[in-house]
Amino acid sequence: MSQQYVLSVLVDNSIGVLGRVTGLFSRRGYNIKSLNVAETEDPEFSRMTIVTEGDSSTIEQIEKQLLKLYDVSEVKLLSDAVCREHILIRAGNSPASRQPIIEIANLFRAKVVNVGEDSLMLELTGEPEKISSFIGLLKPFGIGKMVRTGICALERD
Amino acid sequence: MVLSKLTGADIICECLIEQGVDTVFGYPGGAVLNIYDSLYKYSDRITHILTAHEQGASHAADGYARASGKTGVVIATSGPGATNLVTGIATAYMDSVPVVAITGNVACALLGLDSFQEVDITGITMPITKHNFIVKDVNKLADTIREAFYIANEGRKGPVLIDVPKDITALSAEFVNKPIKPIVPPATLHQDDCIQKAAEMIRESERPYIYCGGGINNARGAKALKTFVQLADAPVSASLMAQGCFDQTDGKYIGMLGMHGTTAAAKALAECDLFIAIGTRFSDRVIGDPSTFAKRAKVLHIDIDPAEINKNISAFHKVIGDSAEVLEKLNRLLKPQKHHEWTQSICGGELNIRQSGTEQLDITPQLIMETLDRLTDGEAIICTEVGQAQMWAAQYYRYKHPRQLVTSGGLGTMGFGLGASIGAKTALPDRTVINIAGDGSFHMNLNELVTLSKHNIPVIELVMNNSVLGMVRQWQRLFYDKHFSQTTLDRPTDYVKLGEAFGIKAFSLTKAADCERVLSEAVKLSQSVPVLIEVKIDRDINVLPMVPAGKSVTEPITEINTED
């Protein structure tokens, strides 16, 4: 049965490592729903959070194949983890839409980070579901452009 | 401790020597001028074999590694030199062969600017190497080379590429010799209880069947395997990559399993209650339809690569580790088992299907291989190209030792064999080395004949000439309504003249009656000079048995009607 999984992958912070990881996914036909990568507290390493989809045997293969890459030092399938996503979104198409958008933003504790003539730019951090429903509520007011970071996740102690 | 400042090119040579390399294969060019200048200086310690084409050099390095168990080294220049290695690297990757490829590149400042003969070879070879490097700091060059050799040989072996920009080969750095980093097997992974359980499964089994893969060669596990087979008292099959890891003259050997496996192997697979897979990755060419594979058996899978467990076939129990080590541990736990009735029912029959030629061309591949087997006392190194001739070479020669068959299994690279035979003969100059080619594969890389004559590498290049692309023709006959699309080659090549043009003694063989005489002369000649033999065979001799792709391996086709 196909299911969504979150992988936390510790990699060497070296040239081409992103290419090696994504190349592995594409050539073996694995799915990347989102991928997030940045340096860790130790600049020698980066941590990737990869959201992928597949049945349990595919996930088993993804974990094992990732571990075969020399730049990969740790692969963890996250079950009990804090998952967060960040979004920047420009919503609204007239000065009249400003007030209802601010109301929605307040409900979600999103922040207004830029005010344009017809639209507002908002930022929000939260669980992916929360981000999705936020986008859904803003849709009727018109969405100019938006960017989501994809999930970054850290397991609980 | 010798501390000195050396150029990058000298560091490359020093590191090769440090790793025990005395032979490299390659082809010079602009970006590797400095490396070749060092090779000139180090020519008393490193022999360089110049091939006709970089692809030939890549296969030679691979063949060298397969035949000897050492690491093969190939050097090529940037751009086309590097891309010409790609097929060879992919071939080595698919068959887990330790090869280190060193490519030159344009100077660091010119990288990424579409400079002359620049190519992103690390990008290109990412999916076909265990790992690859581009060295942009001369101070890191020596350790990178050491790491490359380590990676090529650690765990499941495979090729590693090091790309060295030209300026790095000219710049200097301090160099200190270091001992080779020992390879530590993944000891924590094969805990004793895991091996205990495997031993228990073997004890409980009434009809065990042992299937060996190339991992046994890489682990140098033939000796442990021999004891294991005696203890487990079971029929044995070897994959194409593992030919000879178990002595094929032993009564327990029942031939290959899979697409061109024997009927005995098919029977063993259908009836066994325990399928013991050692050092193997369950290629689709072996398993056919996975849902019908070893249906009545539990699968015990022993392999060094955890990713191979449950990839193509689900294992009931797994042991991850070096197959020689695991077998030695199992051998200590096992008392001799007795499965007389079971082994009797599987072993002992004629393994191969008898071939017959026609009145005009009465030589069969079987006759060739069996004659060669007899003339070389089953001790030759047999290299192959890919296709029908490859399968016949695997079926009709009885391999007694590991590393005796040098063949491209996973990638199935036509044009592999001649280059590989150059490498094999260079590694093992005292052994008779024969490359078995079809006329299709032969024409792909026949340029390397000149390498045989120029360096006087006394290999026998034997071309089974049926004037067709036989394996594809066989499939077209069976599955494409006899539409022999682009497979009727009928090339006018005069093999004797061609051989002579390259400076090689050549024969053409058409009659079975001459087979013994010509082949025996060739084997004698090959003690000192290379030989080319064309053997004319009928175009409709098929490789049998055969299991169509994706079908159950237990039901092979044993006869193909060739009436048109």
Image: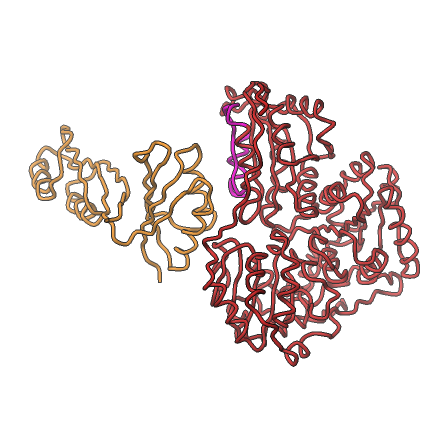
Chain colours: A orange, B red
- Left or right position of B125 against B237: left
Q: Which of the 4 quarters of the picture holds residue A98?
A: top left
Please provide the residue range marked out in magenta. B119-141
Q: Position of residue B240 (x, y in %)?
A: 66, 58
Q: Is residue B225 magenta?
A: no
Residue found at x 56% / y 63%: B277
Q: Is residue A43 above or below residue B343?
A: above
Look at 69% across and 66% down and name the residue there: B255
| Residue drawn at the location 57% of the way across and 42% of the way down | B152
Give the answer, above or below, for where A25 lies relative to B2: below
Please indicate, yes or no, whether residue B486 appears anywhere in the rendered image: no
Q: Quadrant of the C terminus of chain B?
A: bottom right
The reply to whether residue B403 is visible in this rendering is: yes
Where does the image place residue B350, in percent across and percent down from the top left? 75, 72
On screen, residue A133 versus residue B79, left or right, reads left
Asked if the stretch drawn in magenta spans residue B125, the answer is yes
> Left or right of B285: which side holds A113?
left
